[in-house]
Image: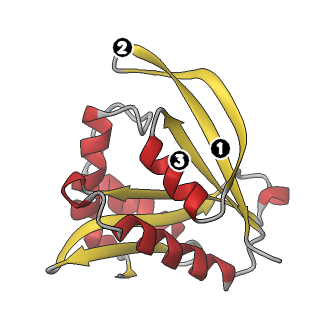
Amino acid sequence: MRPCTTSDAAAIAAIYNHYVRETVITFEETPVAAEEMAARIAKLLPRFPWLVAEDNGAIVAYAYAAPWKERSAYRFALESTIYCAPSHMGRGIGTDLYRALLTTLRTGDFHTVIGGVALPNPASVALHEKLGFKKVAQFAEVGYKLGRWVDVAYWQLPLTP
């Protein structure tokens, strides 16, 4: 695992675009170009961490934190995101990477982190709950993708004792 840089954008976009094209896990419906992904990374670094996991030098997963909302009173709340290449699911890489992200967040001045999950997604639900997140909300049919309505639920983890 290591910090992400904008030079990782093409590999990250390749992982992400699988989920854009094939799943309802993200509500984005158009694949993201490497240049756009680089701009997204650059916008958040260095204040908000991005991490990547590598296997034999290839990026196989990434995780990052971003502001929960833009208004100033939300400045201590984050939203976390993690994606793993389908070929590397079920190997514990996502768990290790998410733990590393949470450790990094705890060293900052952040108070809470929120993970959103498009449902159904049992792997993401299990990951969040394994790491101590608690389910705090569920919204019915808030997204429409791949010909169906999709619910979204949120899990929250305090970062400070």
- Tell me which residue sits at (34%, 63%) in the image: 38
Distance from Cα at disc 1 to Cα at disc 3: 9 Å
* Residue type at the position of mark 2: Gly
Distance from Cα at disc 1 to Cα at disc 2: 23 Å
Distance from Cα at disc 3 to Cα at disc 2: 23 Å
Q: Quadrant of residue 63?
A: bottom left
List x then y, in percent, for residue 111: 78, 70
Q: Is residue 80 visible?
A: no
* Residue type at the position of mark 3: Val
Relative to the observer, which residue lies in front, 3 or 160? 160
- Tell me which residue sits at (28%, 57%) in the image: 89
Say left or right for 50 vs 135.
Answer: left
List x then y, in percent, for residue 8: 27, 70
Relative to the observer, which residue lies in front, 14 or 124? 124
Circle 2 sits in a helix, a strand or a loop, which is it? loop
- Tell me which residue sits at (66%, 58%) in the image: 133
Closer to the chain start, of discs 1 and 2, is 2
Q: Badge 1: how crowded within 10 Å, few (<14), some, or many (20+)?
A: some
Closer to the chain start, of discs 1 and 3, is 3
Q: Which residue is mark 3?
A: 125
Say left or right for 155 vs 158.
Answer: left
